[in-house]
Amino acid sequence: MEQNNLKTRWAKLSVFSNITLVLFKMLVFFLTGAISILSEAIHSAIDLIAALIAYISVRKSSRPPDEEHPFGHGKFENLSGFIEAILIILAGVYIIYESIPRFSSKHKIDSIGIAIVVMGISAIINFFVSRKLYSVSRETDSIAIETDAAHLSLDVYTCLAVFLGLVAIHFTGIVFLDPLISILLGIYILLLGAIHTYKSVKGLLDTSLSKDEIDKIEKI
C-alpha cells in the first residue's frame, strides 16, 4: 500500500510539473516565434498526456486481484508504457514535419533572452523531477513511472539543446539553427519512442526469462 501511495503521489506531481512547463513554453513561443520552442512545447504536451496516463495506470494497477484478473492489474502499467511510447513517436514525427518548411521560410526570433531563460529553468525542473521519478520507479518496480521519468529525462537534454541553440542564434544571428535543432530533436525523440515501444511490448507479451536468469533460479 505504501508503494502504491508513493507511485500515485509522484505521478500526480509529474502531471502538475508538465502543465506548468507546457504553459510557459507556449507563452514563450508566441512571444518569440521560435520553432524550436514550439517543438519543446509539443514535447511537453506529450509528456503531460503521458503523465496523466501514468497516473491513471498506477492507480489501476494497484487494485488487488479479482475474478477477472486473478494475477492482479499490473499489466495496466505495461499498456500505459506502450501508449506513452507511441505518443513519443508521434511527437517526433510532428516536430520534424513542422520544422522542414522553416528552412525555406524567412522568420525572425523576438525576445530571445526570455526564451533562453525559460529553457534553462525548464531543464533544471525536469532534471530534479525525472531523477526522483527514476528513484521511485526502481523502488516500486513501476514501468509506468519509469517511462514517465524517461519522458522528463529526455526533456532535460532537449531543453539544453534548445537553450544552447538559442544562445548561438543570439550571438551569431544564424536563424537557420532554429529548424535544424528541431529536426535533430525530432529524430532523437523517434529513437527514444522506438526503445520504449520495445520495452513495453516485451512486458505485454510475457516473454520468457533469459537463460542467465533461469540458471540462477535453478541454482537457488
Image: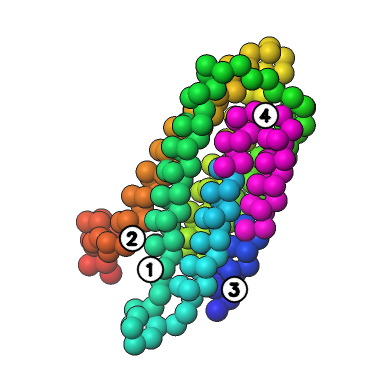
Three-letter residue code for mark 1:
Lys
Dot 2 falls on a residue whose secondary structure is: helix
Write down the region rendered in magenta. 15-42
Label 3 vs label 4: CA separation?
A: 41 Å
Q: Residues within 10 Å of mark 3 (few under 14, many from 20)?
A: few
Label 3 vs label 1: CA separation?
A: 18 Å
Name the residue beneath numbered marker 1: 75
Label 2 vs label 1: CA separation?
A: 8 Å
What quarter of the picture does the N terminus occupy?
A: bottom right
**In the image, is 101 to the left or to the right of 167?**
left
Q: Reading the chain from its start, which is encountered first: label 2 or label 3?
A: 3
**Residue 21 in sight here:** yes
Three-letter residue code for mark 2:
Gly
| Residue shown at 61% from the left, 36% from the top | 38
Three-letter residue code for mark 4:
Gly
Image: 100 above or below 16: above
Image: 23 above or below 207: above
Q: Reading the chain from its start, which is encountered first: label 3 or label 1?
A: 3
Comparing labels 1 and 4, the label whose residue is closer to the camera: 4
What quarter of the picture does the C terminus occupy?
A: bottom left
Label 4 vs label 2: CA separation?
A: 41 Å
**In the image, is 190 to the left or to the right of 43?**
left
Q: Position of residue 163 (x, y in %)?
A: 66, 29
**Can you tell which mark lies on residue 203?**
2
Q: Reading the chain from its start, which is encountered first: label 4 or label 2?
A: 4
Task: Look at the image and say whether residue 21 sits in the magenta stretch.
Answer: yes
| Residue shown at 32% from the left, 56% from the top | 201
Image: 154 above or below 146: above
**Can you tell which mark lies on residue 33?**
4
Name the residue beneath numbered marker 3: 5
**In the image, is 179 to the left or to the right of 115?**
left
Q: Do the residues under discs 2 and 1 have CB atoms within 8 angstroms? A: yes
